[in-house]
């Protein structure tokens, strides 16, 4: 039975269109060999689009993503000199407006090291961490915290509403000009994120060190009120999952432990800014930002993107690693499969994972960030070829 999904594609800036091209090759391959169909709408957007048109994306784009999309796939946003008059990122309506406007409260970041991937340390490629010891999942709260004001401004602009100016505040003991950002953390937002973290832990294989399922709360609850609330909610939600281990760490200590002993961790839940920092640090464990995929998940929508940014200096050179984008597509198809009880989509997502794993273990076609000389297109085509073979083999065995 054919499964048709409405997919909105936002190529964005810089190298975004290049990695999206490889994602579309992957989607074409899936459509050629399965009953899955992706009804695609491509919307131009981002800083470069704003410099040309004065708009961050065409009018009605937010509403299309909200009302006519089963999933959204984003390339990258950001371009030098592309800033709004108030200093905000041009293209923020896209990446930030969708996060807040669609209430994509969970940023899901797998930190997994594949066999064959080496680490660039002191400009040399070497095996620092073992693949068997790096397989954790970080869930970052995605709509509140220190970025809340910017997220809301972007969401309002995306819907054609001009945000109000921020009121001035005085801080006792501080003189002169002051810039400040609120850091709201709510019970409801924390509950949604933390509960999703426990649900992910139920279907994973546990931490590499013990094989036991666990969720670790990362915060700074010894200092800030918001983190004290987050920790309290974590403890309350954790009582609903007696079969899953619970642990907690302060953010400063956690950054050390994650680098030194990543095998300790299974699922990690944390607040917005802390999650932003630790997941980029975690990308070092998996081979760099070119390997870092992500999902932005809400109750009704999902946006999937590589997190390496637009890499302006490499734009147009077919040099960047497309695997973060390909793995984001894998997360998207798995999410669609889970959401719609679509077993074929789930199976396809598993085969994408295997195609990437086999490609990296072979190690002969790698981009510069992994120590190779291959182009973006060459890596994408290699993975697509492997996926095609896997899909054909699966089809032959099912006849």
Image (cartoon, helix red, strand yellow):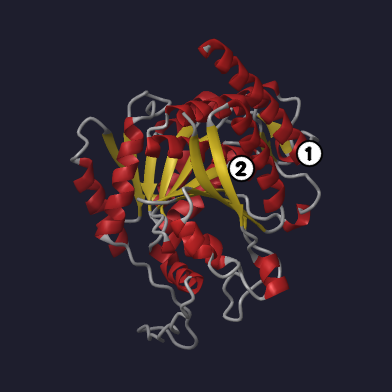
Q: Which mark is residue 375?
A: 1
Could you tell which of marks 1 and 2 lies nearer the N-terminus? 2
Expressed as whole percent of the image width and height from the top left, the position of residue 130 reads 56, 26
Q: CA distance from mark 1 to mark 2?
A: 15 Å
Expressed as whole percent of the image width and height from the top left, the position of residue 198 reads 30, 39
Q: How many marks?
A: 2
Q: What residue appears at the point 33 percent right and 26 percent down from the top-left corner? A: 212
Q: What residue appears at the point 49 percent right and 58 percent down from the top-left corner? A: 65
Say if residue 259 shows up in the picture. no
State whether residue 244 is above or below residue 391. below
Query: Which of 192/397 is in front?
Result: 397
Expressed as whole percent of the image width and height from the top left, the position of residue 15 reads 71, 52
Say if residue 267 shows up in the picture. yes
Where residue 367 sits, quadrant-wise, is top right
Residue sitting at the far front = 1
State whether residue 249 is above or below residue 349. below
State whether residue 75 is above or below residue 148. above
Q: Secondary structure at mark 2?
A: helix
Expressed as whole percent of the image width and height from the top left, the position of residue 339 reads 38, 39
Q: Which residue is mark 2?
A: 325
């Amino acid at each position: 039975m054919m499964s048709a999904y409405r997919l909105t594609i936002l190529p964005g800036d810089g190298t975004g269109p290049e990695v999206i091209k490889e994602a579309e090759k992957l989607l074409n391959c899936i459509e050629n060999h399965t009953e899955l169909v992706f009804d695609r709408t491509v919307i131009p957007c981002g800083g470069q689009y704003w410099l040309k048109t004065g708009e961050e994306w065409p009018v009605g784009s937010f509403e299309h993503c909200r009302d006519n999309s089963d999933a959204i796939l984003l390339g990258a946003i950001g371009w030098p000199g592309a800033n709004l008059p108030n200093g905000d990122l041009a293209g923020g309506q896209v990446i930030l407006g969708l996060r807040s406007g669609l209430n994509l409260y969970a940023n899901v970041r797998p930190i997994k090291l594949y066999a064959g991937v080496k680490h660039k340390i002191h400009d040399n490629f070497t095996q620092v961490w073992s693949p068997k010891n790096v397989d954790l999942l970080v869930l970052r709260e995605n709509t509140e915290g220190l970025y809340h004001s910017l997220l809301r401004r972007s969401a309002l602009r995306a819907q054609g509403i001009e945000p109000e100016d921020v009121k001035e505040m005085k801080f006792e003991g501080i003189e002169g000009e002051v810039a400040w950002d609120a850091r709201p953390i709510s019970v409801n937002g924390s509950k949604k994120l933390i509960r999703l973290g426990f649900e992910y832990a139920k279907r994973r294989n546990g931490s590499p060190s013990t094989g036991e399922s666990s969720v670790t709360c990362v915060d700074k609850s010894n200092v800030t009120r918001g983190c004290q609330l987050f920790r309290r909610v974590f403890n309350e939600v954790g009582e609903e999952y007696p079969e899953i281990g619970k642990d907690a760490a302060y953010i400063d200590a956690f950054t050390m432990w994650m680098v030194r002993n990543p095998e300790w961790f299974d699922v990690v839940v944390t607040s917005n800014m802390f999650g932003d920092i630790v997941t980029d640090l975690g990308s070092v464990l998996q081979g760099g930002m070119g390997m870092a995929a992500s999902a932005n998940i809400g109750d009704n929508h999902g946006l999937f993107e590589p997190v390496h940014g637009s890499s302006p200096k490499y734009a147009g050179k077919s040099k960047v690693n497309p695997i973060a984008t390909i793995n984001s597509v894998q997360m998207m198809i798995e999410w669609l499969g889970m959401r719609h009880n679509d077993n074929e989509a789930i199976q396809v997502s598993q085969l994408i994972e295997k195609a990437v794993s086999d490609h990296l273990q072979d190690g002969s076609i790698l981009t510069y960030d992994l120590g190779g000389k291959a182009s973006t297109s060459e890596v994408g085509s290699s993975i697509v070829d492997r996926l095609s073979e896997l899909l054909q083999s699966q089809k032959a065995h099912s006849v």
